[in-house]
Amino acid sequence: MFSLAIRSVAHRPGRLIATLLSAFLGSVIIMSFNSMHDTAAGKNIDGRSGDTLTIAASVVGGYGTLLVFFAIASTLTVNVRQRSEEISLLRRTGATPAQIKLMIVVESGVVAVVGMLLAIVPARIGGEQLLDIFKETDQVAEGVDFVFGPIALAAGVSVGLIASIGASFLAVRRATKAAAGGPQARGRGRNIGGLIAFVVGLGGIGATFSFKKTDAALMAAPAYGAILISVGFAVFSPVLLRFLLGKLARPITAVTGASGYLTVHNMRQRATQLSSVLMPLILFVGMASVTLYMQSIQNDALDASGVVRSVDDKSIETLNFVVVGIIVVFSCIMLINTLYAATTYRTREFGQQRLAGATPGQVLGMVAVESLVLTVTGVFFGTVAALAGAVPFSLVRVDAVLPDQGPGIWLAIVGIGAAATIVTSVATAHRALRTPAVEAVSLAA
């Protein structure tokens, strides 16, 4: 199976492009920020510069690792689902579940290694640019030399490989069970992980009230609490989506007609598959909103007090804006990758619907309404997670609930997420509908 996996990657590399892109971008982020650990450990570096670089690497490294895992997991899950017929064929020709798992895990490992190797040069450039930002804001001394060493390389390899191998193993395990006709219940480990994320997230938010308003670490507890709650919502997104569809089925059908009926029917059947789209959307809205609103509250509080911003204040602000930039770029790319792969795979489904009597306009309308429902769902739960972190921070920092913080930041974040979701889905579906219905149905799934 090892040699079969290598031949499979070489013969059909396009099938793993989305996974490769996720692994590549993830490795760039992980190695760029972990190179700050290497730089902090260099010679002739002062304590203040070393502390700034270490904090940057640790904080953003944690955010980055979480994003990388979800990005690779979502793209690999879509990829494995698209190979259900191939897996069934291998099972019928005598391959054991263990052999199929080994084949796909090896494929994922190869892709992760290639992505990491391609990321080394961009990560080195990104690390140098990041160090320059810290120097320009007087957070790091001018004489500090950039170092790209073993910590950055080890972090890139370990995170990429663990995420790829772990996600592919879980995805192919579900696929082999489906091929064998096994039960498709949600994994107990996934449920437990989601509950743990909720509990720890709520604990982090509760810990916010144990800090004083002047504590430098005040932002940490609500930020990580909101992130973990976002993770919990993302894990349980299939259940949440089915619940909302049950409540909104009639209004959707009444407003949008045949397209709405197709939307509700398809989304109920494909709630688990659609969770791979909701995950990055919930994380994007939750993480970006809580970070930017807390930083806005902090800036307003400092300006109102007339206190000159310290190096620590500048460092936290820089980190927050860099984190949000990473979240926006990486989450949008992850979302577009997942949507493109998932919608392209539905070409045969679209053909079947057209042969059953649906017009191309109705199919395209179904995809548009489906994207809108996904956007509303992702925005709603991402916003709940963000408020769970931002409101306690605001109460402790300024004794008020989001004072003078208008909806502008939230609207910008929602606009980016909605545009990425709706435009990608509709454009990809429009392209798929160019294929004649009979030809689309004859395509291998």
Image (cartoon, grey):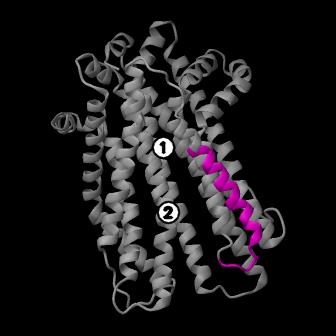
Which residue position is annotated with label 1?
335
Tell whether 64 sits left or right of 291.
left
Residue 418 in view here: no
Q: Nearer the viewer, residue 72 or 411?
A: 72
Quarter occupied by the N terminus: top left
| Callout 1 amino acid | Leu
Is residue 259 or residue 348 the one in the foreground? 348
Assign a secondary structure to mark 2: helix
Task: Identify the mark nearer the N-term, 2 or 1.
Answer: 2
**Residue at (65, 85) in percent of width and height:** 309
Is residue 203 a member of the stretch shown in magenta? yes
Query: Against 197, is 219 above or below?
Result: below
The residue lying at 52 percent from left, 11 percent from top is 358
Q: CA distance from mark 2 to mark 1?
A: 20 Å
Q: Nearer the viewer, residue 264 or 170?
A: 170
Magenta stretch in the rendered image: 193-216
Q: Residues within 10 Å of mark 1 (few under 14, many from 20)?
A: many
Tell me the tag on residue 62. Answer: 2
User: Does dot 1 land on a helix, a strand or a loop?
Assistant: helix
The residue nearer to you, when weighing 194 against 405, is: 194
What is the three-letter code of the residue carrying label 2?
Answer: Gly
SS majority, magenta: helix
Above or below 415: residue 308: below
